[in-house]
Amino acid sequence: MAQQHNRKKHTRLVAAVGALAVGALALSSCSGGSGGGEDDNTLTLWHYEGADSAMGIAWAEAIKVFEEETGATVEFEEKSFEQIRSTASQVLNSDEAPDLMEFNKGNATAGLLASQGLLTDISDAVEQYGWDDKLAPALQTTAKYNEDGVMGSGAWYGIPNYGEFVTVYYNKDAFAAAGLEIPTTYDEFLAVMDAFVAQGVTPLAEAGLEYPLGQLWYQLELSQADRQWVNDYQLYENPVDWQGEEVTYATETLLDYVDKGYISPDVSGIKAEDAGVSFIGGDAPIFVSGSWWYGRFTNEIDGFDWGIFPFPDSDLSLGSSGNLWVVPEQAKNKDLAYEFIDITMRPEIQALIGNNGGLPVAADVADITDEKSLELIEAFNAVNEVDGLSFYPDWPTPTFYDVLVAQLQELVNGTKTAAEVQEGLGAEYDSYVDDFR
């Protein structure tokens, strides 16, 4: 029975890969080269970050340092995410496996490969190099997987060296013109939005056709939750009460936001891009969204001053580690892979990530010379200091993203009550998660 039960779980996780929400991955094609190290002094490396991205810049420098210090050669291949995702199980179970590669975190991706025996248990290397001391607890969650491929416990199968989180962006000029200050309590946050509504301004840039509305819903839950609730929701430790206080508060409050004019009544037809552009254009003074917008706002907003502040009265925030360095079980040069990972965790390489718009996990803030980057990194560090990263609402099941979007559209359109929406979400969640209990 146990063997059949595990097979069912793994089958569901295989399906999960096809349903994975990729996120913002600007990806280019393969540069050629063989799949594995040709000798004991060659490290074969795959990743899918663009050369001009924060990680691409930092890792290119890490390659130079690695080659200088070890005398080894790095055989680098820039793959697209889709190339790695679609062929991972086959390639990693062959002689073509690289020594080290970037791979997406989560149960349906790194967890799946770990459960299939395709990734190396790197727990000994973690202890040897002390990487666990550099990673906040929530960042470690996505690096560990149990025998069923569920994150949060078990052995180490990857190392992240950057992160991401959701925060509140605000238009400083619009706040100043309205005589408003940064809210430090939730009541003050509501008062700010009421003030904008009174001026005929819809305060929140929001999108119900894609992820932002679901992330706001989850942030409202987090404002009423504790770490155990997050562990129950994300790690399946205990059943989630879908008519309970946290979920009910979030669903009813989101509906209240629409009724009070905090969110456009047309939100169900708005895309994430449209919401972001409305903030860039100065049309909406507040945007609750991820750090992945930060660099774009820095480059594209020139008509007003802007900043960020944490969602008031909430110690928990959406966010997680970035993707992982993983070492395939078939890797020929695992020790070289560990040396390279360690270099990417050094302060100087972490600073390159930070000064180029990324969120390093182990940087010395004294090394961050860009003022705008420092603002983001300090905000991220503040979340980690209170163990606040709480992942994303769609992570628990491979199809939860689509269901969440659809259910919240029905909520804001008035075709379902809050209780009906919660019932629909709970049915989707439990139909998958019950297999892991």
Image: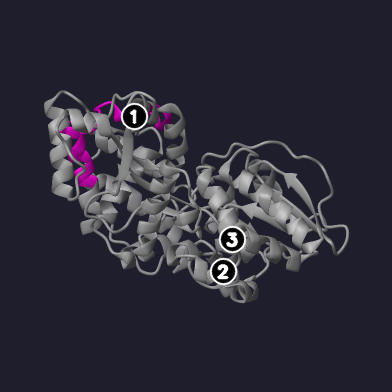
The mark found on residue 345 in the picture is 3
Where's residue 15, x and y in %? 57, 50
What residue is shown with label 1? 279
Of pointers 3 and 1, the one earlier in the residue sequence:
1
Local crowd size for mark 2, using a 10 Å CA cut-off: few (<14), some (14–19), many (≥20)? some
Taking depth in this image into account, of 242 and 189 the one nearest to the observer is 189
The mark found on residue 260 in the picture is none
Magenta part, dominant SS: helix
| Corner quadrant of residue 243 | bottom left
What residue type is disc 3 on? Answer: Met
CB within 8 Å, label 1 to label 2: no
Inspect this view and state whether residue 11 appears.
no
Of pointers 3 and 2, the one earlier in the residue sequence:
2
Local crowd size for mark 3, using a 10 Å CA cut-off: few (<14), some (14–19), many (≥20)? many
CB within 8 Å, label 3 to label 2: yes
**Residue, x 51% and y 67% (percent of image)?**
134
The range drawn in magenta is 251-274
Q: CA distance from mark 3 to mark 1?
A: 34 Å
Q: Judge left or right: residue 116 versus residue 136.
A: right
Of pointers 1 and 2, the one earlier in the residue sequence:
2
**Residue, x 24% and y 56% (percent of image)?**
246
Q: Is residue 314 above or below residue 49?
A: below
What residue is shown with label 2? 131
Q: Secondary structure at mark 2?
A: helix
> From this viewpoint, which residue is outermost toward the right?
39
Taking depth in this image into account, of 277 and 229 the one nearest to the observer is 277
Q: Is residue 218 above or below residue 169?
A: below
What residue type is disc 2 on? Answer: Trp
Q: Secondary structure at mark 3?
A: loop
What residue type is disc 1 on? Answer: Phe
